[in-house]
Image (cartoon, grey):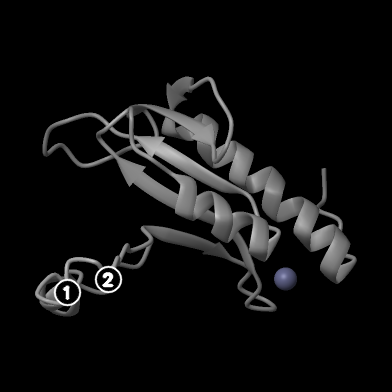
Amino acid sequence: MTYRGKTDRRFNDYHYSWPDDWWYIDLDGIEVCRRCREPLLFYEVTRDAEKVTSILYRLCVRAKLPGLLLLVPDGSEPFTDETQVSWRAIGTRPWLDGPLSDLKESVRVLRSEHDQEAHGWVPKP
Ligand SMILES: [Zn+2]
C-alpha cells in the first residue's frame, strides 16, 4: 500500500468561507482500474449511521457506477483486515456488517468482473 502523505484540506476549509447557499461536499474515495484508469466504485466514509447520501446517489446514477457508504468505528486505531465495519450500497438498506476483509473480497470480485469485461482477462484459479 502506498500512502502519499496527509490530505491537504486547505481548499476544503477555504470553501467553507464561501456563501452558505453554495453547497460543497467531498468524496472519500474512488476505486480505479490501474490498467485503463476507469473509475469502478465510489466510497463515502462516515461515523454517522444516518448520513444522507442523496448527492452521492445522484453521482452514482450519472456515472453508472456503484457506491458504498462505509460506517467506521470511533477511535484512532489503524484499520486492518479485521477491523469491524458496516457498509451499504448507496441507495439501499440495510447495513451489512463484517470485517474489512469481507469488503476487500467484494472489491476484488468487482475488479475481476471489470478485468474480464473490459480487458478480456480471466484470473487464474
Ligand atoms: Zn480497466
Counting from the top left corner in percent of width and height, residue 67 is at 56, 48
Q: Residues within 10 Å of mark 1 (few under 14, many from 20)?
A: few
Q: Give neighbour class at mark 2: few <14, some 14-19, many 20+ (Cα, 10 Å).
A: few
Determine if the C-beta at disc 1 is less than 8 A from ligand 1: no
- Kindly indicate the quadrant of the structure image that contains residue 74: top left
- Residue beneath disc 2: 22
Count of numbered circles on the image: 2
Q: Say if 74 sits above or below 121 in the image.
A: above
Question: As drawn, is 119 to the left or to the right of 102?
Answer: right
Please, what secondary structure does the residue beneath circle 1 have?
Answer: loop
Please state, as top left, top right, bottom left or bottom right, where the C terminus lies in the image.
top right
Q: Amino acid at mark 2?
A: Trp
**Image spot of residue 66 (x, y percent):** 63, 50
Which residue shows up at 65% across the image and 65% down it? 63
Q: Is residue 110 left or right of residue 5?
A: right
- Viewer-nearest residue: 69 or 5: 69
Residue under numbered circle 1: 19
Kindly indicate the quadrant of the structure image that contains residue 25.
bottom left
Q: Is residue 74 left or right of residue 121?
A: left
Residue type, label 1: Pro
> Percent from the top left, x then y, of residue 79?
28, 40
Q: Is residue 107 above or below residue 23?
A: above
- The answer to whether mark 2 and mark 1 are in CB contact below 8 A is yes
